[in-house]
Image (cartoon, rainbow, N blue to C red):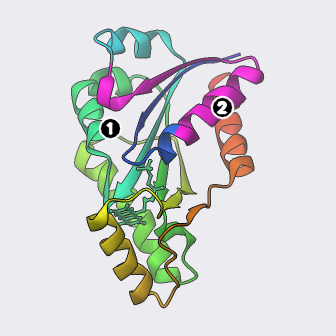
């Protein structure tokens, strides 16, 4: 049984859903989990990390960059994070592409993030996120319509689409939790 802190950063909510799913799954598997929104990090986060066996960071990608609140958490709590094994869940849509170059680009966002924040996780999952076409404001709708057009894909304004592979997420966090007890 491991003690795990999960810290997530989200814009439209999919990474929160992913982090909650991971937390619920690990709790069912008898691990102890603290779930923290990077945009509302508690003052005692250093202590919580110090008491944990490992930390999972989850961040979504917007305009080729990972969530800024997660980057700030790494910056502020770097010493505590560096003292613990870490795992990273990168949430994007580029990782779904059939084009190998586009998938490599999505993977490179994570490499850039690690380089920028100066933190190296033990394990990385590139998870597909969601399209929230029904909820985007006009500017996001315009951007996503443009991306869909560039890729020759249809854009359905009122339709949400979730692409996350929940079983792959469970296997990833389970593997990380197991690695903490060996
Ligand atoms: C305005 C906007 C920009 C995005 N930019 C990218 C991008 O550059 N690369 C990518 O792979 N996915 C991009 N996405 C897809 C998001 O990563 C995906 O929708 C994810 O599920 C968002 O997670 P969140 O709801 O936790 O913020 C973008 C989405 C939006 C709405």
Distance of label 2 from label 1 (alpha carbons): 23 Å
Image x and y of residue 22, in percent: 63, 34
Residue at left 49%, top 44%? 15
Magenta span contains residue 23: yes
Which element carries disc 2, helix, strand or loop? helix
Is 73 situated left or right of 81 in this image?
left
Residue 40 in view, yes or no: yes
> Quarter of the image containing the C terminus?
top right
Image x and y of residue 67, in percent: 32, 46
State the residue in front, 102 or 40.
Answer: 40
If you read the primary sequence from the N terminus, does the residue marked by circle 2 or circle 1 appear first?
A: 1
Q: Which residue is mark 1?
A: 70
Question: CB of residue at label 1: within 8 Å of ligand 1?
Answer: no
Instruction: Tell me the mark number nearer the camera, choosing from 2 and 1.
Output: 1
State the residue in front, 7 or 141.
Answer: 141
> Quarter of the image containing the N terminus?
top right
> Magenta region's main secondary structure?
helix
Compared with residue 112, is residue 45 higher up or lower down, i.e. above or below? above
Near mark 2 (Cα within 10 A), the count class, few <14, some 14-19 or many ≥20, is few
Is 36 situated left or right of 98 in this image?
left
Q: Which residue is mark 2?
A: 179
Image x and y of residue 48, in percent: 42, 11
Number of the label disc, if any, that sits on residue 7? none
Residue 182 in view, yes or no: no
Q: Residue furthest front?
A: 158
Is 79 situated left or right of 177 in this image?
left
Near mark 1 (Cα within 10 A), the count class, few <14, some 14-19 or many ≥20, is many
Which element carries disc 1, helix, strand or loop? helix
Question: CB of residue at label 2: within 8 Å of ligand 1?
Answer: no
Residue range in magenta is 17-41
């Amino acid at each position: 049984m491991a003690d795990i802190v999960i810290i997530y950063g989200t814009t439209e909510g999919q990474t929160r859903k992913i982090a909650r799913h991971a937390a619920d799954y690990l709790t069912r598997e008898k691990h102890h989990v603290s779930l923290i929104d990077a945009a509302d990090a508690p003052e005692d986060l250093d202590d919580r990390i110090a008491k944990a066996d490992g930390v999972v960071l989850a961040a979504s990608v917007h305009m080729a960059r990972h969530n800024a609140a997660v980057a700030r958490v790494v910056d502020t709590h770097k010493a505590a994070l560096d003292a613990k094994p870490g795992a990273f869940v990168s949430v994007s849509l580029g990782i779904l592409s059939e084009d190998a170059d586009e998938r490599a680009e999505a993977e490179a966002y994570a490499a850039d993030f690690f380089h920028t924040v100066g933190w190296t996780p033990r394990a990385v999952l590139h998870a597909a996120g969601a399209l929230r076409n029904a909820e985007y404001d006009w500017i996001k709708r315009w951007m996503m319509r443009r991306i869909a057009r560039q890729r020759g894909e249809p854009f359905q304004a009122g339709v949400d689409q979730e692409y996350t592979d929940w079983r792959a997420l469970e296997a990833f966090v389970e593997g990380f939790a197991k690695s903490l007890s060996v």
